[in-house]
Image (cartoon, coloured by chain):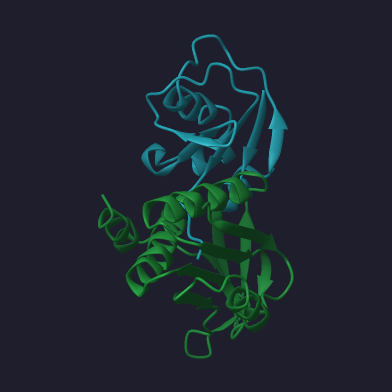
Amino acid sequence: MSALIKIAVQAGVIDTYALTNALEKSNLNIGAMASFTGFCRDEGGVLTALELEHYPGMAEAKLNEISHEAATRFSLDALTLVHRFGKVVPGEVIVFVAALSRHRDAAFDGARFVMDYLKTDAPFWKKEHRKDGSTGWVSAKDVDDSAKSRWK
Amino acid sequence: MKLVYFAWLRERIGTGEENRDIPNHVKTGGDLVNWLATLGDEYASALAVPGVIRVAVNQEIIRHDELIAGANEIALFPPMTGG
C-alpha cells in the first residue's frame, strides 16, 4: 500500500495539534508515530522575528520528493510535512513533520531523514529581525551537511 | 531567459527576477555565475564567492559544471537554511 503523504508550504500558523489529531485517526494499522516540531527561538531575547523566504514551486516539489523518498525507504504508512513562510515570531512553529508506520524504528527514522534532507535541500532561507532593529541572513551550517550524510 | 534570485543574493542584486539574453559562450551553471558577476557592482558583490552559489535549472539544482541548455527558468541562491 502506498503511503498517505501530505505536504504544505503556508503563511498561516501551523496547528500541530490538529495535524497530529488527523493523523492519529487516519489508519488503524498504524502502530507508531514520530514527529518533529521546529520552533522559532528568540535567541535569549535578541530576536523579534524570523522572515522565511522560499522558492515557490520548487519548495513544494522538494518537500514532496523528500517525503516520498522517506516513505519508500522506511515503508511508512503516512507522512505529513508542513513548512511556514513569511514572518514567524518566537514560539511559533517553523516546520512540522510526522512519520507513521507499523513500528517505531521506521517512524523515528522517517521523521529524522525528512528533517536532515529538508535542511540542506529544500529552498528556504531565514532572515533574522532583531530587537535593536538590525537584520541578517542565517548562515548554512556544516553540521547540517554531515547530518544528511548519515543516510548515505 | 528568466532569472530568479533569492535571499541575500536577491537583496544584493536588487531584484528578485529579470529577463536576460544569455551569451552563447555561457554554457554551464558556473559560466552563468561568472558572466553575471561582470554585469555590475551589485552582481559582483552578490556573486563574489561563486562556490557558495546554488544554481537551479527549471527548479532542479545543478552542479556548476553542468549545462544550462534547455532552461526556461534559472534560479540562483545561497545555501538553504530552512527547517
- Residue B61 in the image: state x and y as whole percent: 48, 36
| Residue that appears at 43% across and 55% down | A70
The single residue placed furthest to the bottom in the displayed view is A45
Q: What colour is chain A?
A: green
| Residue A131 occupies quadrant | bottom right
Residue most toward the top?
B24
Residue A10 at x, y percent in the picture: 70, 63
Q: Residue at x 62, y 59 (%)?
A: A7
Q: Residue furthest right?
A: A12
**Residue depicted at 68% across the width and 71% down the height:** A87
Of residues A98 and B71, the one nearer the viewer is A98
Instruction: Determine if residue B8 is in view.
Output: no
Q: Colour of chain B?
A: cyan
In the drawing, does residue A119 fall left or right of residue A148?
A: right
Determine whether B5 is above or below A78 in the image: above
Is there any visible trace of residue B60 in the rendered image? yes
User: In the picture shown, does residue A82 fall above or below B20?
Assistant: below
Q: Is residue A152 left or right of residue A92?
A: left
Give the farthest residue toward the front: A29
Could you say where residue B23 lies in the image, as x and y percent from the top left?
A: 57, 13
Does residue A5 sit above or below A46 in this rendering?
Answer: above
Against B26, is A92 above or below? below
Quarter containing the N terminus of chain B: top right
Residue A30 on image: x %, y %? 49, 72
Tally of numbered tags: 0
